[in-house]
């Protein structure tokens, strides 16, 4: 799916780097979610924060790779 969106063959370095970066975002968000819910459980606020963190992190990755980031 990433390769198709990027218009590149699946095994290219660029596609693999984006996949690895997305994986890192998911891992960090999952670790943060686990830390936030440890001992106090899952609350609507924690779920909301988790969704926002995922959206923000994935947005950073996709904007940077697509060249639409303002930097």
Image: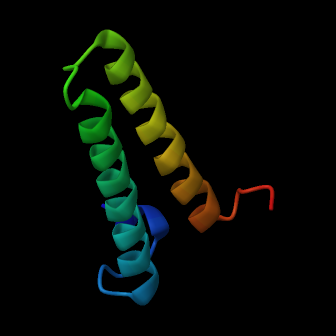
Quarter of the image for the C terminus: give it.
bottom right
- Which residue corresponds to the image point at 30% horizontal and 56% vertical from the top-left? 27
Q: Nearer the viewer, residue 12 or 33?
A: 33
Q: How many marks?
A: 0
Quadrant in which residue 35 is drawn: top left
Task: Tell me residue 50's x, y (percent).
Answer: 37, 31
- Which residue corresponds to the image point at 36% horizontal and 63% vertical from the top-left? 24
Q: Nearer the viewer, residue 13 or 25?
A: 25
Image-based side of 51 in relation to 65, left or right: left
Quick one: which residue is furthest to the right in this view? Answer: 71
Task: Tell me residue 18's x, y (percent).
Answer: 43, 70
Task: Tell me residue 15's x, y (percent).
Answer: 40, 76
- Which residue corresponds to the image point at 19% horizontal and 20% vertical from the top-left? 41
Residue 3 can be seen, yes or no: no
- Which residue corresponds to the image point at 72% horizontal and 57% vertical from the top-left? 69
Quadrant in which residue 46 is drawn: top left
Quadrant in which residue 64 is drawn: bottom right
From this view, report whether residue 28 is shown above or below residue 64: above
Residue 6 can be seen, yes or no: yes
Quick one: which residue is furthest to the top in this view? Answer: 44
From this view, report whether residue 60 is shown above or below residue 47: below
Task: Tell me residue 47's x, y (percent).
Answer: 32, 22
Give the colour scheme shown. Answer: rainbow
From this view, report whether residue 45 is shown above or below residue 34: above
Quarter of the image for the N terminus: give it.
bottom left
Quick one: which residue is furthest to the front in this view? Answer: 39
């Amino acid at each position: 799916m990433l390769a198709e969106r990027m218009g590149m063959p699946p095994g290219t370095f660029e596609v693999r780097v984006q996949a690895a970066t997305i994986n890192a975002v998911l891992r960090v968000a999952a670790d943060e979610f686990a830390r936030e819910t440890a001992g106090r459980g899952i609350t609507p606020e924690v779920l909301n924060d988790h969704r926002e963190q995922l959206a923000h992190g994935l947005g950073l990755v996709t904007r940077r790779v697509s060249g639409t980031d303002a930097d």
